[in-house]
């Protein structure tokens, strides 16, 4: 069997791009398959303040492009594609994917010695009535992406962690009022974000509260809320709701192939190897990641070095 | 017992600076103790090409300063100091250190809830006769730091890994000729660096060879070499030797306090916690690190988030 590539990386967020940079610099023949533009979920972050090296912050979209440019300089190839399936054959892996080109698609399959899974995670849904119905009509999972539709509206942000508060602060520029709704008795975000939220007159917080339904007509009009401690039910008139209650790994197509934890994250060892020789996982997709840009980047580097060692030993 | 700090970070390389950024952004009272300027060993790297986000490369010294600036913006405090000892007292740690101020020193001790060990590693010595005698007289462990003394000289670089080849390439601008000496039968550096070395007419390589002694008069004049496969002994006339044969962790003062591996690296779990609650380790100092700037940065972030979680749970 002849391999088309020595490494195929699935995912073009910070983990995939860092892995691509290192694999390319090691002189490996490496292809990166991503189903969106460089940066992955990072593209939706208006200003990244916590990636070390950028004291004035940097837009997530720009950081993604810079990382891609750097990796391509050393020979990384990139194709816009959705990976559908991974098949094992002897010591090789066959990646089946749908290439996306200017409105057309093409089914392809590539043979590779190693794979680095860096497909990240996507925002969890609330799972309440009305959520799917009003998607794109006031229900959003990315404030920066969908900001214009919130202009001069009262917007609820479901989720009191770092992601929710970051989005809430961002929305203060457009929305007329923001209400952060958190199920736990208090916000869980880092203190610096909480301080900024409490100092902002446009933001209110509402903890110990569950969203039970989203209602409206041609767009979102109201949320049904439930107070966890008093069991009181109320209705909150809103013009939109942004859901940031956590992440779910993009691993549904890997069930049965790779060992996953109970939430679907890929299980790995210290070298980021899965139990299948030649398959590695890096970034938000793996169990135990701190889910930050900096940790995803570190993971990408570790996985690429591990893949390189395996290729030198085995092929 | 009253803590002076919630987190004390030991070491001002990329791991320590990333930990400082995250701990400060979390609103923790955090002090960074470093025995050199921001960046640690990174300061000696002329051009960092493999830290994701800088497609044109960035000097290690500049990257260190940018990371420090970013962390201080959120409240990180920094003191130039050498940490001498860590004592445990109930749930607190007492850090004994020597502060370094404009030529004077002062013994201090700080009480802290948690400690992040990010003291990195230093270059290993060859351990051969003449090495200590000629230190600073042609024997060097940092090409960028000591470059001028190699001008127009024949220089041996001991070590055929990434660090050795990077230094050899850097020295081509000043030295008249460079001979890379590697004990293994071939170079172990990444392919891109090997390609550059083989393409450079100023550099020769000499693999399967051991340096047995360094001799000279007021400065280095010759190396005694031993060919591992033929057992032949030869003498190589040189004007200097740069030693880059690997790293040793800066953990000698931690023996008996923390569990270390056989090479002295700190043992940690997935959250980068040591077996002593409240002591974490990040970057090159810990067992299993890939020892890259990007992985050190990822570690610093992970350790700071782990420390933050522990503080919220326990204190």
Image: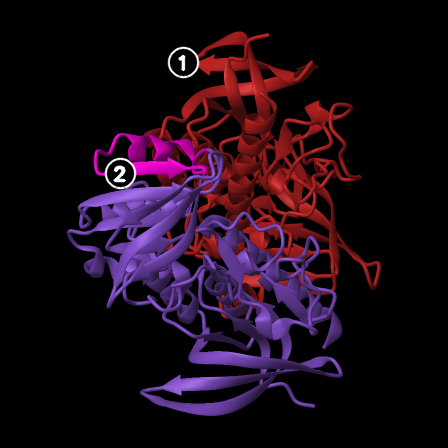
Chain colours: A red, B purple
Check if mark 1's residue and mark 2's residue have beta carbons within 8 Å: no
Residue B234 position within the rendered picture, expressed as x and y whole percent measured from the top left: 36, 44
**Looking at the image, residue A53 lies above or below residue B88:** above
Tell me what residue is drawn at x 64 percent, y 38 percent. Answer: A285
Q: Which residues are magenta?
A: B186-208
Check disc 1: other Cα within 10 Å, few if <14, some if 14-19, many if 20+: few
Marked residue chain, label 2: B
Residue B120 position within the rendered picture, expressed as x and y whole percent measured from the top left: 50, 62
Quarter holding the C terminus of chain A? top right
Q: Which residue is mark 2?
A: B203
Tell me what residue is drawn at x 46 percent, y 25 percent. Answer: A28
Tell me what residue is drawn at x 49 percent, y 69 percent. Answer: B11
Q: Is residue B181 magenta?
A: no
Residue B14 position within the rendered picture, expressed as x and y whole percent measured from the top left: 45, 59
Q: Which residue is mark 1?
A: A102
B217 sits to left or right of A138: left
Residue B35 position within the rendered picture, expressed as x and y whole percent measured from the top left: 43, 75
């Amino acid at each position: 069997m002849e391999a088309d590539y020595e490494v195929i990386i699935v995912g073009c967020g910070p983990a995939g791009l860092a892995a691509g940079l290192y694999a390319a610099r090691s002189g490996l023949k490496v292809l990166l398959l991503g189903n969106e533009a460089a940066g992955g979920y990072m593209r939706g972050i208006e200003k990244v303040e916590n990636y070390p090296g950028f004291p004035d912050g940097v837009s997530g979209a720009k950081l993604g492009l810079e990382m891609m440019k750097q990796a391509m300089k050393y020979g990384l190839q990139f194709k816009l594609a959705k990976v559908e399936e991974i098949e094992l054959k002897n010591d090789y892996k066959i990646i089946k994917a749908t290439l996306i080109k200017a409105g057309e698609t093409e089914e392809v399959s590539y043979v590779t010695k190693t794979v680095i899974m860096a497909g990240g995670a996507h925002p969890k849904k609330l799972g309440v009535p009305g959520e799917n119905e009003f998607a794109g009509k006031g229900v959003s999972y990315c404030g920066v992406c969908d900001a214009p539709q919130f202009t001069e509206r009262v917007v609820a942000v479901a989720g009191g962690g770092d992601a929710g508060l970051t989005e809430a602060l961002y929305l203060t520029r457009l929305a007329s009022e923001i209400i952060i709704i958190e199920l736990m008795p208090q916000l869980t975000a880092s203190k610096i974000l909480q301080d900024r939220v409490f100092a902002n007159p446009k933001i209110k917080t509402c903890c110990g509260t569950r969203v039970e339904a989203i209602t409206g007509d041609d767009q979102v009009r109201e949320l049904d809320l439930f107070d966890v401690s008093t069991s009181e039910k109320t209705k909150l008139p809103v013009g939109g709701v942004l859901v940031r209650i956590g992440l779910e790994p993009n691993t549904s197509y890997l069930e049965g192939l790779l060992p996953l934890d109970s939430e679907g994250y890929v299980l790995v060892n210290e070298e980021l190897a899965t139990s299948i020789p030649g398959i590695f996982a890096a970034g938000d997709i793996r169990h135990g990641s701190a889910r930050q840009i900096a940790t995803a980047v570190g993971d990408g580097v570790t996985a690429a070095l591990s893949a390189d060692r395996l290729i030198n030993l085995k092929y």
